[in-house]
Every structure is written in structure tokens, then in C-alpha cells.
Image (spheres, rainbow, N blue to C red):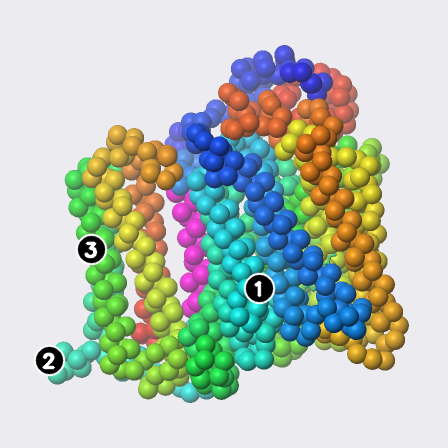
């Protein structure tokens, strides 16, 4: 071991063999996983069945589509600030908004957190050699890629992509006059169906790997919170995507076959040239199906972010996570509650006040577990030995941003205030803070944190800090003023503000747009940093952040195919043993047995 | 892992979830995966059926009478629900043959296992064929289409073709896999350790049980679809 992390590997080697003596670890329940061994360059790097590669492939594909989402948002912002330039007309604006929303929520963040980080981290953190079904896992990525191609192809078909907003509400989405109401919509729905199929193949892998393929000693309550977040988010996704699938299927039939699941009495001449008259459909049904998926979706993105940020905070503050079990139960409680709040997106759809009462109550109940998590992060930081590394900066920024978004959530969750604020820029500010900016900040932090594990090299700190400050401060300057605009009544989804009475708002629009361009360009620093560091960055020492979780304890770094060399690791403790009184180092990795730690008084195993 | 030494009842539940390595002790990855998949699929069918209820409650015209739509004339006498009764009977019976196939799989009785797998596939195929017959009859002779029908609310046809079609697709996929499994068992892949063509992994007779889980699920779902469309 050329660059050791300072641990006494002689003792550790002994622990592998003598594990039965000291702490009792039950024997292996199933034989070692048999791995697929690739024979050619193609099956090693392209059609790879190694979860680590698949994770990186997911990461790259999701990031690529995010760039499209970002470019679209810049175009929209330019249009809003300088309508005179006419970069977009009403149709293209709507198409941009729809594609931007869909891309960012589903094809970027969901794919990135579950497909990207899930694949990369779950086997490593659980001490598995790979996902349980590598072949299915590989197919998951390729179907995802196909769904991306179908999505992008909607820019090439007659009429362009659909332009009904990412919520795709019928009847508007189908009727003539809405851009892309034929081919664009069909491609969007096909793309979504493909995404769900691909995701399910991957998702089953993530869930079963966590449930059934952990290493010896790795109990559920010893898993890093990153795994918990991704795991629970995957379960939510497996139960929530069905609603989108069914909703989308019915919408597809309404579009292509002229059924009227959702279409109330309407005569439309649009559907593939046929004149169809519909009646008796229920547009509200789509809203219910969409949001039964749509709200849990928010937590599909947020829970992995919660989990990862917990680990970033703990490692970089050298403190055990405060209230680990509480954190786990909070994740589970949030997940459970997320299934009974969906209609808070439909307060203005018109239903009885009792309905609103129920959904407002459940919505506000989510604030309890979320609040617990916020306080626990704060208490983890409290008197911690904080290292202001780039991942830590991003984690702190997440904390502030999410707090902000959570507070405005109080306004959106209550029926009375929501009805006033609905469809204004207040909403745009709220959801960008919570599911836009906050998770993306975590993604950045996570990339800086795990980049050494993936490539063996460190990302440049200096560039990282520049990138951080521009992104964080910039994002605040973009979205904070939108609260004000929203309170002024500036409506959402308008391609131009005309000469409204809010003169102050149009000045703000220019300001926001200029900052947007700066922030968008500053992402080039990030990409440059990644490409440059992957080639010529500083070589990372083993376990560069002095972390405890298993992914850093592989025999090689970056880990090879099969992750663990000849013997699987044995786990003796949770991943948060930082600054244990009496221990010689300020961290004790999960695979260090109690007998190896001399003098420690309060280690938790 | 010796399962008989594990604690039983609620203690066992707590023990398994608090244990390392596996939550479902002694359960193979593939089987666990099938269970979770079926859970997800249950949500798909639930969404479909709940949508049916909602859609049915909000139509402008009244919902067609099932016994009229699905009647079948035999020798000049109209018998309501005849075809569907046969279909249901065939599909439920196939669950029985499937269960027997699983049993023979565990006994490594290749011949009988293959036969019962093929029987199951045959029942499945018969079900799909009868469904195709029913669809043709409805579309061609009775003018029921996804966008309209002479009996009442047009959503009837829409939901009917969508839901039975979705279920029929499940059956068809099941039949295909049953045939693949039958071939594997017949060839003795599970004894010789022959590797899968795509996955390059070995498999064993557990695969039959996993196949069985899927098949029983598809049958069970049919019972609900049957009740929602034909009996109500
Ligand atoms: C710097 C980055 C971003 C900028 C400048 C930006 C800008 C915008 C703009 C201008 C709109 C349209 C507002 C309107 O006219 O109503 C919008 C909508 C939206 N954005 Fe972003 N956005 C960014 C990042 C993100 C991210 C990361 C997400 C991830 C979840 C996201 C999700 C959405 C959604 C869901 C919508 C709503 C689309 C709709 O109304 O149908 N955005 N964004
Ligand atoms: Cu919500």
C-alpha cells in the first residue's frame, strides 16, 4: 500500500481472520457473488455491467441533458428580461418551459441521484461486489439513454415538443393551439414510459442490493445515511412512478386514439387529422394521477440529497451525525407522508374545503420530520471540527437554501395563502429553492467529495471555491427576488410581462437574467475542473477525507471490478465514529474491529 | 443460514430487520426482486382500477350494462358472461398447473416439470386467444371501440380495452417466459449449470418458483379486473 491512510493494516488483516473471537460477527449467509467478467473493451467500458461504470454513465448522460435544461432556462430568462430581442415566441417559450421542467426534475435529478449515485455508492457502501443483477442494471442505463434520445427527438418532429408545462394538464395539452399537441406530446409520453421502465430495472437492483446483499456486520442501522436516502427514495419511486405511467398511458390513448379519459365535452380536429368529439372525461383524474406521482417525486430528489448531505456534514465536521436513528426514521416518515399530500398541488383545481383541510394538515405534518433533520444537521455542526472544504461549503449552502425553500413551503401548503400565491413567481422561487437549487448544490458537493474515489485524483480546491461562490450567491440573487415578484402578483408561465404596473419587477427581471447568464457560464469552471482534474489533477491519497464509510476502505483506489479484492470487508460499527474519546485518530473506519482500537472509551459499535 | 434457529413471530421480524446481510433470511435475490417488482406492478393495476372507478363516476352518459355487453349467444339462447366465465376458469386453472410445475421443479423431475409448464403456457395462450376473440366480437360486431359504443358512456370501451389489454400483455409476456423456462428445464440447464444467453449467469430451479410468483400475480389481478368490469 504505497499511500496508506495511516491505519494499522497489520492489525486489520488479522481481524479478517480472527473476527469470530472479539466482536461476534455472524458468518456469511450466502456464497460470494459471481461476477460478470468482460472480455473486450466494449463490454468493459461501454456495455459495462459494473455498477460503478453504470453510475458514471448515468451521471454523464443526466448531466448532458441538464445542460440542455440549463440552456433552455437561459433562453427563457433572456426572453423575460429583453422581450424586444424576441429570442422566443409564445410557443417556443412554452416548449422551453415544459422541456426545462421535465428534464430537470425527471431526466436530470432523478436519474442522477438514483441511477448515478445509487449505482456508484450502494454496492461500495454496503460492502457488496456489485448490484445483485448486473445485466438488468446495464439494461436500465441503455433504456434510460433511449428515453433521452426520444425526448430530444421531440425537437425534430413537426410541431416541436409539447408546450403545456411540465405538468402536461389535459385538455390543454391535447387540444389544438397548444404547441406540440401531437407528435411532441407522443414523444414526451413515450420517453416517460421508457424512463419508468428503465428506472424500474435499476430501482429493483438498488432495493434488493440494500435489503439482501450487505456484507457481514452491515446491519440496516449501520448504513450511511446516503444509502438510506437513496434506498428509501427508490422505494418511493417504485410506488409513485406507476401513477405517472398510468396517467401517461391514458393521455397517450387520448392523443393517439381519440379516447376521452380526460377530455370533457370538446370537439377537436387536431388528433392526427381526425375530427373527434369527446365527452364525459375527467381532467381532474389526470391531476390526481400526476400529483400522486409528482409530490413523491419531490422526495425522490430530496431524500438522496438529505442522505448525502448528512454524510458530507458529518465527515467534514468530524462529528458523528446527531441522532442517527432519528434521521433514519425521519427519512421513512417523510417518505410515508409524501404519499398522502399530493392534492396540495391542486388547491386551485376546485374541491370541497374539507379536502383542502386534509391535505393542508398532512402537508404541514411533513414539516415535523423535516424540521428534525434540519435541527440534527445543525447539532452535528455544533462544536464540530469543521473543515471548510468544497463539499462542506456546498453542504452548508444546501442547508441554507433548503431552509429557505422549506419556509416558503409553509405558505404554499396552506390553502388560504396558496390560493393567493398560486401561479405566481412566488411558486417558481419556492420550488427552485427546494428541488432546484438545494439538490443541485448537494450534487456538486457530492461530486467534489467522491471524485477522488471515482478517478483517484482530487478536484482543484481553488476552482471549486470559485465555482461554489458564484453558484451559491448567484442562485440566491436569481431566486430571492422572485419571492418579491410573486408577492407583487407577477404570474408564472408568461412569456412576456408586457407593460404591467410592476415597473420594479421588469428592472428585477433584467437583473435576474444577467445573474443567470453569469451562473450558467460559471458552470464551465466546474466542467473544466472535472475534465482537467480527471487527467492531471493532484493524485488523491487513500481515503482523502478520513471518512469511515466502506467505500473508502477498498484495497485499491479507485476500486477495481468486484470492489473488494479477495475478501469482503467485515463491518463492526456505524460509519460515524469521529473523534471518539481516547482513540488515537479522529476517525474509526467501519471495518475496524473493537479490539483494534486501543484506549477508546465511547466507540459505538 | 439455518432458518430453524431464528426467532419466530414478532421477535423474528425485529431480528431480521436488525440483522446484517439479509432482511429476508434465506430468500434468494431473484425472489426478493420479483416480490418488489410485483409490489410496484400492484400499484400500476391499482391506479388503473381506481382510474376506472373515478372515470366511471364522472361520465356524462350512463355506464353500459355489463351483462348486455358481454352476453354470448349459444344456440339462440343468450347467456350472459359465458365466455368470460370460461376465460376466468382457464386462467385460474393455470395457477394450479403452475403450482404443480413448481413442485416438480423442486423435486428436479424434469419431465413432469416441463409438461406442467407447457400446460400452464397453453392455458395462458388459450386465455389470450379467447380475449382476442372477445375483442374482435366487441369491435367488429357490436361496435364497441375505445372512443365510443352504442351501449352508453364512451369511457367504457376506453377503460375496457386499456385495462384488459394491459393485463393481456402481462399474460402474453408470462407465456413467453413459461416457454423459455420449459425449454431450459427440458434441456436440463438447471442441473448442468448451463449459463444464461444474455446474463451469462447460472440459474436453478428457483427460477420456476419466481416465474410462478409472477404467474399467480397475473391471475390474481385478473380476478379484480373481472369483478370490476363484468360483475359490476
Ligand atoms: C440556474 C438554473 C435555473 C434557471 C435559471 C431556471 C429558470 C426557470 C425559469 C425561467 C422557469 C420558467 C418560469 C415561468 O415562466 O413560469 C423555470 C421553470 C421551472 N424550473 Fe427552472 N431554472 C433553473 C434550474 C432548475 C432546476 C435545477 C430544476 C430542477 C428541479 C428546475 C425546475 C423547474 C420546473 C419544474 C419549472 C416549472 C416548469 C413549468 O412551469 O412547467 N429548474 N425555471
Ligand atoms: Cu407537493
Q: Nearer the viewer, mark 2 or mark 3?
A: 3
Q: Is residue B202 magenta?
A: no
Going from N to C along the chain, the mark reached first, 2 or 3, is 2
Q: Which residue occupies 61% across, 28% down?
A: A558
Q: Please report the residue visible at 37 percent of the width from the left and 77 percent of the height from the top.
A: B146
Contact between labelled residues 1 and 2, with CB atoms less than 8 Å apart: no
Horizontal and vertical percent for residue A54? 54, 40
Name the side, left or right, on which A112 lies relative to B73: right
- Residue that label 1 marks: A155
- Mark 3 and mark 1: span between their CA atoms? 45 Å
Residue A451: quarter of image: top right
The chain to which mark 3 is attached is: B
Please tell me whether mark 1 sits on a helix, a strand or a loop: loop
- Above or below: residue A25 compared with residue B178: above
In the image shown, does A28 or A304 lie closer to the viewer? Answer: A304
The residue lying at 50 percent from left, 84 percent from top is A268
How far apart are the two marked residues, 2 and 1, measured between alpha carbons? 58 Å
State the residue position of label 2: B75
Using the rendered image of the protein, determine whether residue A74 is visible from the camera's viewpoint: yes
Whether marks 2 and 3 lie on the same chain = yes
- As for residue B44 lying within the magenta part, the answer is yes
Above or below, A495 against A550 in this view is below
Q: Can you identify the residue that label 3 sits on?
A: B122
Q: Position of residue B36 (x, y in %)?
A: 45, 49
Q: Which residues are magenta?
A: B31-49
Residue A337 visible in the picture: no
Residue in front for this viewpoint, B54 or B17: B54
Name the chain under label 2. Answer: B
Amino acid at each position: 500500500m504505497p499511500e496508506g491512510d495511516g491505519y494499522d493494516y497489520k492489525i486489520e488483516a488479522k481481524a479478517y481472520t480472527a473476527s469470530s473471537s472479539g466482536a461476534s460477527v455472524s458468518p456469511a449467509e450466502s456464497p460470494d457473488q459471481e461476477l460478470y467478467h468482460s472480455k473486450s473493451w466494449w463490454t468493459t467500458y461501454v456495455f459495462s455491467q459494473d455498477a460503478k461504470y453504470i453510475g458514471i454513465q448515468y451521471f454523464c448522460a443526466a448531466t448532458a441533458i441538464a445542460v440542455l435544461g440549463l440552456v433552455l432556462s437561459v433562453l427563457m430568462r433572456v426572453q423575460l428580461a429583453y422581450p424586444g430581442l424576441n429570442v422566443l415566441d409564445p410557443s417556443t417559450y412554452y416548449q422551453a418551459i415544459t422541456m426545462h421542467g421535465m428534464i430537470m426534475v425527471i431526466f436530470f435529478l432523478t436519474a442522477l441521484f438514483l441511477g448515478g449515485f445509487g449505482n456508484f455508492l450502494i454496492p461500495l457502501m454496503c460492502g457488496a461486489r456489485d448490484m445483485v443483477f448486473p445485466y438488468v442494471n446495464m439494461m436500465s442505463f441503455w433504456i434510460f439513454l433511449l428515453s433521452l434520445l426520444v425526448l430530444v427527438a421531440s425537437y425534430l418532429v413537426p410541431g416541436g415538443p409539447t408546450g403545456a408545462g411540465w405538468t402536461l394538464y389535459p385538455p390543454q395539452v391535447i387540444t389544438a393551439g397548444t404547441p406540440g399537441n401531437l407528435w411532441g406530446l407522443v414523444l414526451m409520453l413515450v420517453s416517460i414510459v421508457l424512463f419508468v421502465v428503465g428506472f424500474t430495472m435499476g430501482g429493483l437492483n438498488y432495493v434488493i442490493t440494500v435489503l439482501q446483499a450487505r456484507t457481514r456486520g452491515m446491519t440496516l442501522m449501520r448504513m450511511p445515511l446516503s444509502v438510506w436516502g437513496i434506498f428509501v427514495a427508490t422505494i418511493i419511486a417504485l410506488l409513485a412512478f406507476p401513477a405517472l405511467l398510468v396517467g401517461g398511458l391514458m393521455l397517450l390513448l387520448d392523443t393517439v386514439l381519440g379516447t376521452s379519459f380526460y377530455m370533457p365535452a370538446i370537439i377537436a380536429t387536431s388528433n392526427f387529422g381526425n375530427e373527434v368529439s369527446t365527452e364525459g372525461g375527467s381532467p381532474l383524474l389526470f391531476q390526481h394521477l400526476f400529483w400522486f406521482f409528482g409530490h413523491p417525486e419531490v422526495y425522490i430528489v430530496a431524500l438522496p440529497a438529505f442522505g448525502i448531505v448528512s454524510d458530507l456534514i458529518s465527515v467534514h465536521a468530524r462529528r458523528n451525525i446527531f441522532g442517527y436513528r432519528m434521521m433514519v426514521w425521519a427519512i421513512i416518515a417523510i417518505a410515508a407522508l409524501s404519499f398522502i399530500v399530493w392534492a396540495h398541488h391542486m388547491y386551485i383545481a376546485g374541491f370541497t374545503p374539507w379536502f383542502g383541510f386534509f391535505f393542508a394538515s398532512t402537508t404541514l405534518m411533513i414539516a415535523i420530520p423535516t424540521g428534525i433533520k434540519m435541527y440534527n444537521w445543525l447539532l452535528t455542526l455544533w462544536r464540530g471540527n469543521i473543515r471548510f472544504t468544497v463539499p462542506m461549503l456546498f453542504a452548508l449552502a444546501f442547508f441554507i437554501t433548503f431552509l429557505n425553500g422549506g419556509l416558503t413551503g409553509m405558505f404554499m401548503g396552506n390553502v388560504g395563502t396558496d390560493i393567493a400565491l398560486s401561479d405566481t413567481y412566488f411558486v417558481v422561487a419556492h420550488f427552485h429553492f427546494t428541488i432546484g437549487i438545494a439538490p443541485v448544490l448537494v450534487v456538486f458537493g457530492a461530486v467534489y467529495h467522491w471524485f477522488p474515489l471515482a478517478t483517484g485524483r482530487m478536484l482543484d480546491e481553488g476552482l471549486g471555491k470559485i465555482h461554489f461562490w458564484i453558484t451559491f450567491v448567484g442562485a440566491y440573487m436569481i431566486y430571492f427576488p422572485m419571492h418579491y415578484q410573486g408577492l407583487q402578483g407577477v404570474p408564472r408561465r408568461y412569456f412576456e410581462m408586457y407593460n404591467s404596473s410592476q415597473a420594479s419587477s421588469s428592472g428585477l427581471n433584467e437583473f435576474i437574467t444577467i445573474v443567470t447568464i453569469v451562473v450558467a457560464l460559471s458552470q464551465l469552471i466546474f466542467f473544466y475542473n472535472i475534465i482537467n482534474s480527471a487527467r492531471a489533477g493532484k493524485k488523491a491519497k487513500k481515503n482523502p477525507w478520513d471518512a469511515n464509510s466502506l467505500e473508502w476502505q477498498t484495497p485499491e483506489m479507485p476500486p477495481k471490478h468486484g470492489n473488494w479484492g479477495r475478501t469482503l470487508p467485515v463491518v463492526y460499527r456505524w460509519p460515524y465514529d469521529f473523534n471518539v474519546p481516547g482513540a488515537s485518530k479522529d476517525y474509526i473506519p467501519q471495518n475496524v474491529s473493537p479490539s483494534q482500537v486501543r484506549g477508546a472509551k465511547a466507540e459505538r459499535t | 443460514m439455518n432458518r430453524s434457529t431464528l426467532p419466530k413471530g414478532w421477535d423474528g421480524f425485529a431480528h431480521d430487520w436488525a440483522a446484517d446481510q439479509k432482511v429476508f433470511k434465506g430468500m434468494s435475490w431473484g425472489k426478493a426482486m420479483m416480490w418488489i417488482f410485483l409490489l410496484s406492478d400492484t400499484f400500476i393495476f391499482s391506479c388503473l382500477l381506481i382510474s376506472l372507478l373515478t372515470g366511471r363516476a364522472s361520465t356524462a352518459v350512463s355506464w353500459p350494462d355489463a351483462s348486455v355487453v358481454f352476453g354470448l349467444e349459444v344456440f339462440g339462447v343468450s347467456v350472459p358472461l359465458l365466455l368470460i366465465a370460461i376465460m376466468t376458469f382457464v386462467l385460474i386453472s393455470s395457477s394450479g398447473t403452475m403450482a404443480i410445475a413448481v413442485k416438480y421443479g423442486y423435486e428436479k423431475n424434469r419431465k413432469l416439470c416441463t409438461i406442467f409448464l407447457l400446460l400452464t403456457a397453453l392455458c395462458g395462450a388459450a386465455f389470450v386467444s379467447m380475449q382476442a376473440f372477445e375483442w374482435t366480437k366487441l369491435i367488429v360486431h357490436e361496435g364497441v371501440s375505445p372512443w365510443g359504443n352504442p351501449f352508453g358512456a364512451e369511457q367504457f370501451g376506453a377503460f375496457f380495452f386499456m385495462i384488459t389489454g394491459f393485463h393481456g400483455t402481462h399474460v402474453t409476456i408470462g407465456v413467453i417466459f413459461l416457454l423459455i423456462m420449459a425449454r431450459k428445464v427440458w434441456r436440463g440447464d438447471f442441473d448442468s449449470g448451463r449459463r444464461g444467453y444474455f446474463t451469462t449467469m447460472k440459474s436453478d430451479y428457483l427460477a420456476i418458483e419466481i416465474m410462478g410468483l409472477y404467474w399467480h400475480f397475473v391471475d390474481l389481478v385478473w380476478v379484480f379486473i373481472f369483478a370490476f368490469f363484468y360483475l359490476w
